[in-house]
Amino acid sequence: MLKNSFRQLALVTVMALTPINMAVLNSEVHASSLPRSLTSSNSSKLTGIPIAQRYSGSLPNGTNIIPPQNFQGRGTLKVINGTGYDAIIKLIDKASGRVQRFVYVQANQEVTLKQIGFCDCTLKFSIGTNWNPNTQRFSQSRLYSQFRESLNFGEIRTPAGVRWMNYTATLHPVKGGTARTVPISERDF
């Protein structure tokens, strides 16, 4: 029953990939005149995010299920889970098919993924209950979806500095949302 109501909700409503500020490509564009440099101290910020451990039922918010990939950039993705169910999100590079980020987002929480390097990515997510660390999926009430629009985390050097993209995605319906999701199979997740 719950699974069917979520499927109907996903088919009927608009899920949102909303900008922080209305700007280019449903995102926020940032510019910096600082030279692009990434030192080991910058990349060590990611080590403070917990890597998945064996928990029953749920993981801490923001847990990396796999270690982050491609964190040599300035792009960010803020994910807001306004549902009453935990979620997992995958950011997948469309060209290589590689998972750039695979992160746990608890119910009614948000997570910001930082230092996303250049990629044209697909954002997929699953919501559910009773996380199983062995299968890396939810044991109950699973629903899988994918945003139709891709997220382009390009960086452009200009005479004024570097421009990059920041996105905000909500996993729940938002009035006036600008993006649609489509249901996908567990296999396609």
Image (spheres, rainbow, N blue to C red):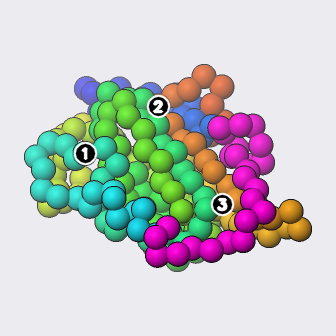
* Amino acid type indicated by mark 1: Pro
Determine which residue is flagged by label 1: 60
> Which quadrant, please, contains the N terminus?
top left
Determine which residue is flagged by label 2: 172
* Amino acid type indicated by mark 2: His
For the magenta stretch, what is the residue range? Answer: 19-42
SS assignment at label 2:
loop
* Amino acid type indicated by mark 3: Asn
Q: CA distance from mark 1 to mark 3?
A: 28 Å
SS assignment at label 3:
strand
Q: How many marks?
A: 3
Task: Point out the tag, 2 or 3, that comes first from the N-terminus.
Answer: 3
Please, is residue 18 above or below residue 93 in the view?
Answer: above
Where in the figure is residue 135, as x and y percent of width and height?
A: 18, 59
The one nearer the camera, 119 or 64, is 64
State the residue at coordinates (78%, 48%).
24
Outermost residue toward the top in this view: 175
Task: Point out the tag, 2 or 1, that comes first from the N-terminus.
Answer: 1
Please, is residue 13 above or below residue 126 in the view?
Answer: above
Determine which residue is flagged by label 3: 152
Q: CA distance from mark 2 to mark 3?
A: 22 Å
State the residue at coordinates (57%, 35%).
16
| Position of residue 174 in the picture relative to residue 187 (left or right) | right
